[in-house]
Amino acid sequence: MMTTPGKTRLLLLLLAFLPSLLLAAGNTAYINEIPDFTQSRITGWQYGHGSEYCAPVAVSNSLMWMTNFSIEQADLAKLLASGRYMNTSIRRGTTTSGLLRGVEAIAGDLFGGYTSLEYQGWKKHPVQFSTGTKVPDIHWITDGISKDSAVWLNVGWYQYDWLNDIYHRVGGHWVTLVGYDTSILIIHDPAPRAGQSFANEYVYTSRIGSGILTGRLSGLPRPARGYLLLGEGMHVKKAADVAIVDGAVRFRR
């Protein structure tokens, strides 16, 4: 495993040689309105003290803003994690399929349905939500930010073997996308390592030019070219070297 100085040198090298993603005029209109709830605020052994609740928390950020709930956000996250919705495991977290089915169900309960619910990425998911796109497109992602829509990013944690240009997946995480500006994605990160108080995380992005994504999950290995690397501003898990966008969910009520 790389040391912290090793990770820093690696990220500097990657960001120096990978092309930045220049986006159209940014959208920061809602970044201070959408909640930024921390998953560790969910307490109780039956909930795993929130350690695997990044997906229900990330979605609850958007729903609390879109619906003006009178209930506590922790209670909404617990509801979303239940078997009726995402069926979140306190050991394994939430699958992409679980998040999609959970959003579909809660949208039916809250709004009587939805306009669109789509997924881009390589993770296994129900066909009715598929766009057929395995490499998430940053313009498709950022186009989903509006008053009536939401975007949730599935971030993969990877250890990088720079000698062989191989990214080995060691875990994953869900975050709420709240805005963007030039080559920066603005996210609300449920992880405690991102802090306990409200914060807009400004994350620089690059597109990977070569290499292989590997891991134990179905869908891997696959070429890394074209996937989004999340650089400066991303709170990377200690066990990993880099963060890559494995997939994205775009919802419009």
Image: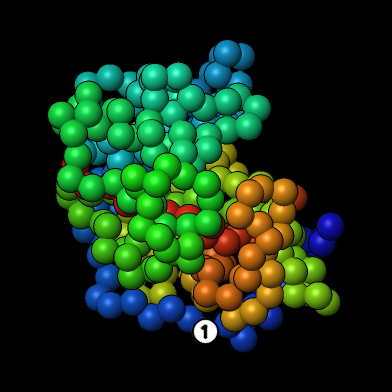
> Residue 180 appears in which quarter of the rendering?
bottom left
Q: Label 1's element?
A: loop
State the image coordinates of residue 238 (x, y, percent, origin top left): 72, 50
Which residue is more in the foreground, 52 or 109? 109
Report the quarter where the C terminus lies.
top left
> Residue 40 appears in which quarter of the rendering?
top right
Q: Is residue 199 visible?
A: no
Which residue is more in the foreground, 95 or 17? 95
Q: How is the image coloured?
A: rainbow
Q: At x 54% / y 65%, what residue is drawn?
A: 230
Crowd rating for badge 1 (residues with CA inside 10 Å; few <14, some 14–19, many 20+): some
Q: At x 52% / y 84%, what residue is drawn?
A: 19
State the image coordinates of residue 36 (x, y, percent, origin top left): 39, 41
Q: Is residue 140 visible?
A: yes
State the image coordinates of residue 136 (x, y, percent, origin top left): 44, 64
Q: At x 27% / y 70%, what residue is drawn?
A: 26
Residue at the limit of the structure toward the front, as seen here: 127
Report the quarter where the N terminus lies.
bottom right
> Residue 215 appears in which quarter of the rendering?
bottom right
Three-letter amino acid code of the residue under disc 1:
Pro
Taking the image as shown, residue 45 lies to the left or right of residue 118, namely right
Q: At x 63% / y 49%, what residue is drawn?
A: 218
Count all numbered tags in the image, as a single digit: 1
Residue 21, above or below 230: below
Q: Which residue is mark 1?
A: 19
Residue 42, above or below 241: above
State the image coordinates of residue 185 (x, y, percent, origin top left): 41, 64
